Image (spheres, coloured by chain):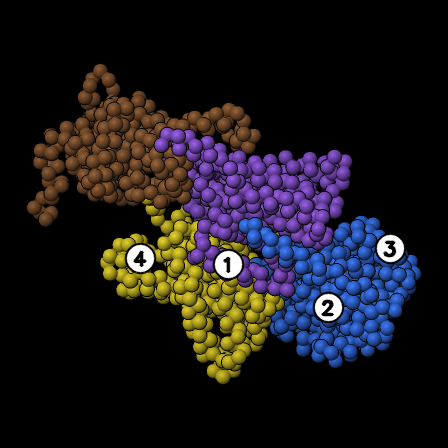
Chain colours: A blue, B yellow, C brown, D purple
Amino acid sequence: MKQKLWVLAAALGLGIAAAAGAADTVKIGLMAPMTGSWASEGQGMKKIVELLAEQQNAKGGVLGKQIEVVTEDDGGDPRTASLAAQRLTTKGVAAVVGTYGSSVTEASQAIYDEAGIPQIANGSTAIRLTEKGLKHFFRTAPRDDEQGRMAAQTIDKLGFKKVAILHDSTSYAKGLADEANALMKKKGRDIVFFDALTPGERDYTTILTKLKGANPDVVLFTGYFPEAGLLLRQKKDMNWKVPFIGGDATNNADLVKIAGKEAADGYYFLSPPQPQDLDTADAKNFLADYQKKHNELPPSIWAVLAGDGFRAIVAGIAGAKSADGGQISGYLHKDLKNFSGLSGPISFDAKGDREGEVYRVYKVDGDGKFVLQKL
Amino acid sequence: MEEFFQQLTNGLAVGGIYALIALGYTMVYGVLKLINFAHGDLFTYGAYLGLTLLTSLALTDRLGFAAGVLVLALMVMGLVAVLGALLERAAYRPLRQSPRLSAVVSALGASIFLQNTLMLIYGARFQVYPDNILPAATLNIFGLYLPLMRVLIVLASVLMMVALYLFIQKTKIGTAIRAAAIDQDAARLMGIDVNRVIMLVFLVGPALGGIAGLMVGLYYGQINFTMGWVYGMKAFTAAILGGIGNIPGAMVGGLLLGVIEALGAAYISLAWKDAIAFCVLILILIVRPTGLLGERVADKV
Amino acid sequence: MSSAPAPADPVKPALLTLAEVIKTFGGLTAVNRVSFAVDEGTVVGLIGPNGAGKTTVFNLITGNYQPDRGDISFAGRRLNGLRTHRIIMLGIARTFQNIRLFQQLTALENVLAGCHYRMRGGILSAMLNLPAQRRVEGQAIEQALQALEFVGLTQQVFTAAKNLSYGNQRRLEIARALATQPRLLILDEPAGGMNEQETEALIGLIEQIRARGITILLIEHDMRLVMRACDKLVVLEYGGKIAEGSPERVRADPRVIEAYLGTEEDA
Amino acid sequence: MKPRPEVLGAGAFVALMAVAPLFLNAYQVDVLNSIGLYALLGLSLNLILGEAGLFNMGHAAFYAMGAYTAAILNTRYQIPILWTLPLSGAVAGAFALAVARPVVHLRGDYLLIVTIGVGEIVRIALVNDVFGITGGANGIFGIGRPRVFGYVIRRPEQFFYLIWGFVALSIFLFLRLKKSRFGRALNYLREDEVAAEGSGIDTAYYKLAAFGLGAAWAGMAGTLFAAKMTIISPESFSFWESVVLFMIVILGGAGSIAGVLLAAFLVVGLPEVFREFAGARMLVFGLVMMVMMIFRPQGLLPARGRRFPWVASAGALKQ
């Protein structure tokens, strides 16, 4: 046993040696789900941030130093994330981009805050993340309450009266469902159904039958795309023609593959703009570069928002003329106004939330394309 | 009332799949007294192999829908059966004389291993069957919507179960399986090659699990490498519900569990659906550990 | 209670009595209206062909099975419905037909199981290692060592049970049973699998146990042992009692001879 | 008299661990903290699975009970988190007793299935915000940092001493327990239940006692977990958590305290060292489980027979 422990200790020791590197670069951390259920998002985040760093370094880096991106895998899991955060703090990063899931981000927040390292999350939309008064936490993603507001508004504009709300009991989906529910009730909409499905199953006919019994004008599903695809597919099998509206977690090309084009036709969802719908010149140029390098578009807007987080950090370091966490955070809070991000202008409010409206409404057409709607 | 019957048919369709998988559990348990935890993953392999064969060989394009799917089903059954036999050889046979815990742990290890092999090969993302394979038609009977494919799935399941039942009850090989299930030593004395019986059980059970996987893939379209776990747990519950080791029991248990789930979700709570299924399992084990159709056997002291 | 057994000594009631005990499994009647008594200080043998229900009778006495009908009482106390460990605590100890030792544990640990119920101390006193706890442990170990010495396993105190020879495993089982300080010791085929020498030594051991005032009820196929060691025999066939009495009388009983040799129609 | 090699090994291990935080960075210390928590949970499961041989694959449920009790008491009633230790242990233990009572007589693999079911029911209950106190999928956040003698425990190395101190205390107590009649009774159960009952041991009582004590300890480990993470949510108590704990006990050697420690290091520590192969971690787990059962079912460091040194000398005198 003793021997085996020594081997382990030695292996851990090697880890330290590797971590102690040179200090003539500015290190920016990226915490992303490189493995696990959200690995495709994490891969996209990494590709975008690394390409941006490459381009910035070609322009001379920041503060006259080259930028080094240090990526750590959070596995899409809170406990792995807290270890990833510990690793990044010990590697001397100036600031951190990431991550995707809200509960995953939450597990890392306190660690960065206590270490005085600014963190800009890209996919974490849970409201409470910015309600804790953390000085060093920001996000380029919108908040769930904004999406909830947008959902209520869209249902209003489309003229639906009786609404069924279905979530999947995850933190994100439940939060969004609660938010939309409260807003629509206030406006006098009739909420005829509010319940959760079990994610990860195949057969949702039981739920659909129950939903149909409630006879809604529209169903708001706040969960993720795999379930949304199955719901649409099985809904079509039942010959039920009610429209579905989904949240941004259903913004994924696989939705149409799972549902089939015919069943997905007419499905609405809310989302920040798709990468290809970004209309600034900056975004168009960058996406062209990205496509040239990786021969594909970024997997989702969330990866692009990681790129925005990275750009904001670089701007913060340049603006504060320092790689010190406190200075960067101070600059981001006060001085960064209408910074030109890939996804539009970026400013942070006192809580670290992004100012301005980000959500758009999309509809799936007969070819399975996601078409931006003007409502 | 209409909604009640609709939910009933929903439950039966899901239950048919459970029953088909439950047969594999119940056969292995009958002969080896082992919970083959990896059985649910063999089901997943059926779904993945089906997808790969379907897309790479373009069977339905070449042979048409019916013949294509039939050939595909036979191929999947064959491959998964071989996989099942290999599993028995590698993970269970060396432990035949070991304490029960060893075999259970090995089974669990095999399950984790199979599942993650699949993940490394295909990736962690959902895989999607092409959506234009099956004819989409929905029957409307007295106001009940019955998608044609669901009806076919239940029919195919029941057909296979009946065939298996007749095979076990009426053929000589089936008698050997039943004998080995009652007492392996006695069966051996009667000149039955118990190793071959066990091998056979590990061919037939996985073949049925594999075809269930293919049906799920074809009908639901979306598969993923962890799905065998949930289906496996449910199917095992079904096997216990019906009386483990008992083939009609697995059929009854599967269909019943599907219906309990559907009605529980409809009239008790959607969000607690799986908890309801597990409560049924625990209650059965407390109240009637032999299941609905099982017989009570005294423990040897 | 028509055929209630008459105690041999009318002054002193029997230590163990079975009255009209019935046990069925499914459709099979394993024990059919069996009655007999075991007097204190005697050695009683329960014999009969394979499948006659002998071991089932033992399992009924020690509470592993519950009788469907009939009464079992020990030292004036009804045993029906009691769980096995309660019955052991009343003063009945047993060994098993297929040796049931704690295979991975040492001989000493095995025998300490028999001392267990007379010891005091729970989780807390063990964790705190209180003086009382240590004293109790010390006494138990002493008693366990005595039991091991009694059966002649002094050399194997720290040997794992699975590494003992067959004969020694049987002895260890007896030592474990004796460590419960029983009034009645039940032995299920104690000479099973033993060679002649070992059987001889076992007969000596049974004499010694008896000399300690412990009553013995045993199942055995080895007729030499049965005839030499037992004061009384009870013969079972197909779950029912067919004879009872001294070895000489039973040996001469035509029904017993028939049961053991088979009738002409059977053959 | 020369000390035995395992005593030397244990001494070296304690010395090494005592100074480890001085040489390691925050991340590495945090990995050791994770290992410590798993070791603690492994030790608690070892009582049930390793010592008593009861197949429990729902241990995460008891762990969750403790963590949630602590978190609720701390966030709602502002009870300092470490003060909740006894109560969260008691709640987890009482829950285990209530659950185990009707099912504990079931045969090994049936018990396994039931405990998996219980684990899932608890997780579903937590996700569905049962009684409105578990916070649903969000879990409970804002759990206070623990304080020891006025010091706030915050940094990884501070947690290191808290967690490993508790591990050391647990090992100390469990070693004593192992030597006592209680510890032996659990082993009798594992080896042969019928023979145990037939030797006068109340098997039903000891099965429940093993469940209760093991669960109570897991509950206390849950408190430490909640204190360290400051946020707990149902996904931390999934079925796979139970599987990993089951593995730690089986891999190390059922009933072996040193084995559990070693297995915790291997199962939690190695994937951190070889992070680039993280995707294959579970695959290796599965393979190891199969291969171990075939070639080394007793585990890496199997438990040894109790020695009773004073008996050895007494026995020698007699001979």
Q: Which residue is mark 4?
A: B180
Q: Is there CB contact under 8 Å for labels 3 and 2?
A: no
**Where is residue A358 drawn, in percent x and y?**
81, 65
**Where is residue A347 drawn, in percent x and y?**
87, 62
Residue drawn at (39%, 32%), measured in percent from left and top?
Answer: D315
Q: Chain of mark 1?
A: D
Question: Closest to the observer: D37 or B132?
Answer: D37
Asked if residue A67 shows in the view, the reply is yes
Dot 4: element: helix
**Where is residue A117 drawn, in percent x and y?**
81, 56
Q: Which residue is mark 3?
A: A326
Q: Which residue is mark 2?
A: A46
Marks 3 and 2, how far apart in space? 25 Å
**Where is residue B43 drawn, in percent x and y?**
48, 64
Q: Chain of mark 4?
A: B
Dot 2: element: helix
Q: Are marks 1 and 2 on the same chain?
A: no
Q: Chain of mark 2?
A: A
- What's the mark number on residue D288? 1
Marks 1 and 3, how far apart in space? 47 Å
The answer to whether C217 appears left or right of D149 in the picture is left
